[in-house]
Image (cartoon, rainbow, N blue to C red):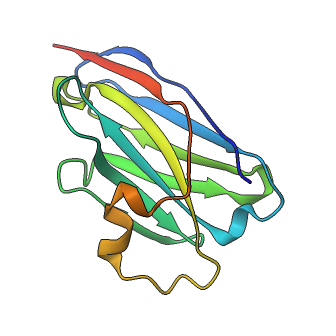
Amino acid sequence: QVQLVESGGGLVQAGGSLRLSCAASGRTFSSYTMGWFRQAPGKEREFVAVIRGSTTTLYADSVKGRFTISRDNAKNTVYLQMNTLKPEDTAVYYCAAVDDPLGYYSSSYYFEDSNYDYWGQGTQVAVSS
């Protein structure tokens, strides 16, 4: 069982930055692929970024070049650095984990929220224009 707790959300002006953190419980954090999703009001939850292992990352086109996902396995924490924020980035951001010790899934597997085993409670990000 893995518990995920997000933090770092808040209100920021367009063009600003935020760093989200997701702290995970458990002793096998390094074997999990970690993802970030977001859900804006009235919209479906959507993929933002994923990190498999320590260096393999994938991003949604809408955030590529602005957001960076990283992880610190010693701290059981995954981060999402968000720069050049836009009003359309406003959403509740969720951290998610999938048990993936071999890391053999295709990239598209990680885009689907239904493939993740554990979820955090979410943290609100609001970007004002």
Please tell me in which quadrant of the rendered image residue 103 appears: bottom right
Position of residue 126 relative to residue 117, above or below, is: above
- From the top left corner, tell me how far across and down residue 80 is, in percent: 47, 44
Q: Is residue 54 left or right of residue 14?
A: right
What is the quadrant of the C terminus in the image? top left
Q: Position of residue 39 (x, y in %)?
A: 29, 34
**Relative to 20, residue 96 above or below:** below
On the image, the x and y values in percent for residue 93 come to: 41, 34
Q: Quadrant of residue 88?
A: top left
> Depth check: 114 or 60 in front?
114
Relative to 119, say whether 93 is above or below.
Answer: above
Farthest-out residue, right: 27
What residue is at 37 percent from the left and 22 percent from the top? Answer: 125
What residue lies at 43% left-to-right and 60% top-to-bottom? 50
Quadrant occupied by the N terminus:
bottom right
Q: Is residue 128 left or right of residue 49?
A: left
